Image (cartoon, rainbow, N blue to C red):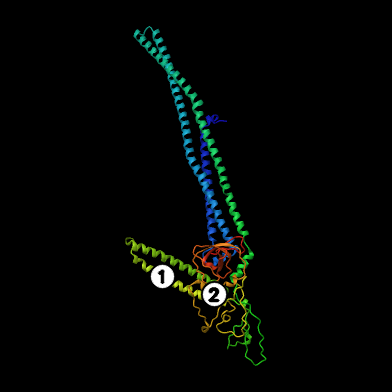
Amino acid sequence: MSFLSLQDQFDNLEKHTQWGIEFVEKYTKFVKERSEIETNYAKQIRNLSKKYQPKKNSREEEESKYTFCRAFLMTLNELNDYAGQHEVIAENLTSQIITELTRYLQDLKTERKSHFHDGRKAQQHIESSWKQLEASKRRFERDCKEADRAQQYFEKMDADINVTKADVEKARQQAQMRHQMASDSKSDYSSYLQKFNQEQNDHYYTIIPNIFQKLQDMEEKRIERLGVCMKTFSEVDRQVLPIVGQCLDGMTKAAESIEPKTDSKQVVESYKSGFEPPGDVEFEDYGQAMKRTVSENSLSNAREGKEKPTSKSKGKLWPFIKNKNKGSGPEDFSHLPPEQRRKKLQGKIDELNKDIQKEMDQRDALTKMKDVYVKNPQMGDPASVDPRLSEISQNIEKLQSEVQKFEGWLAEVEERMPSKSDTHRRSGFYETQNSTTVSNNCAQDRESPDGSYTEEQNSEIQVKANPNPTSTTPEFDDEFDDEETLPTIGTCKALYPFEGHNEGTIAVAEGELLYVIEEDKGDGWTRVRRNEDEEGYVPTSYIEVLLETNAKGAMTYI
């Protein structure tokens, strides 16, 4: 079926094509709103992921130790990638449908306007030809009537004997003229008729069919373009499904990576105090006339020379005593249990060493700049760098002093902690003091059951700190005796040079690559091997360790 059968429905066809253009505009608006929904949804998902991302503070760092916290972080990252796929949908809808349809609409409107303009022009031309034909027909009719009247008048004058010969001649000439005019009008009418018939034939069988065929092609292309866009609309979603599936798989994998037992062990590691459970309470015989004594292993808070009423002498057992030290606590972390205090001190020393390294890097850079100024005075004044160099030197001295102070406290803590066995280099229990008398400067007096240290002014131990971190190096010589060669569990890279003076340690150069044969057990040392004959301990903070994933308890220390 062709549009040629609608030649008499030109106006209705014009309305239909206009409605078709409006439908394309409506579909374009629909896709645009869908794209905006995808964009807003992706933005909200990204904001949600960003809102619950861990903040850079100590609390979040503590939480990152647990597998369920890391799984949640992985879920947030996958969710962020998931939002990105919705942004891709919005971008593809805009580029592949909205932009294309907007451009096509302009061309469609221009083409439609041209076709209907040609149709109206052809219609006007055939109507003009019809009017000309009608005018020539009326003129021919009028001239024929005038010729008949002139002929009748001449015949009347010729039959009248009273009319002069001149009047008869005049009437005859008038009749001849009218007949000639009628003949000319007849020729014009015949010519216009022939012309109109030809034009009408061209109009209905050539011009209008061509215009209607173009309109039909235009309409079919419009419908076809809509079909392609609707197919693209679904394909845009289908294209991102594999990546969306990967995001969902990542979330599932994150959930499956949660290890409850590992997290519970981490809780133990984080909050283990290192205190020894209290010993048996000695029997106090009130029947004898002797001074009441307190068992060495008793957790009573009574001191020598001070007696409390018997009704209030009993206290809570140490696992249930609440730590009354709130806030940040003293600088030396003496309010913490020994194990926790050692970790805090070691962490503080590592932070200070990093700050020292930063200051030294700045000093080196300024020194090089000063050398350039000395060699090329036109580039700057060498003296302008001196104030900053002096300030950096003071900062380094201050930081080194802080490191010495914290290393002294660390050495003090490690002296009081129990020695580590060959198989387990750190233990959660303290050795029981066998002495019956407790001096004022012993660790037993300073380690209170509530997790803090109570020291007397006259019993404070002064420890001279060594700026070299190897001063706190434990003795490792016993661990190497009669021990089989350990397998490699990973690799490491030295971040800083380490001289390794103490026995059991190994010297490393900055940037050197080594094999890890025993990971850090919590004391700040990692056992490494250079070759089959050279191995030893290096500070964990001096290296970047990457353990193999199949190694037991593997994790990365930075």
In the figure, 543 relative to 245: above or below?
below
At a point 52% along the width and 81% down the height, the residue shown is 461
Count every numbered label the image shows and give the total.
Answer: 2
Left or right, 137 with reference to 451: left
Residue 292, numbered label: none
Residue kind at label 2, given as amino acid type: Lys
Image location (x, y in percent) of residue 529: 56, 64
Left or right, 171 with reference to 414: left
Circle nearer the viewer, 2 or 1: 1
Image location (x, y in percent) of residue 278: 63, 79
Image location (x, y in percent) of residue 410: 53, 74
Q: Quadrant of the N terminus?
A: top right
Residue kind at label 1, given as amino acid type: Ser
Indicate the secondary structure of the residue bearing disc 1: helix
Residue 393, numbered label: 1
Cα distance between the residues tagged 2 and 1: 36 Å
Tell me if residue 479 can be seen: yes
User: Circle 2 is placed at which residue position?
Assistant: 326
At a point 53% along the width and 36% down the height, the residue shown is 221
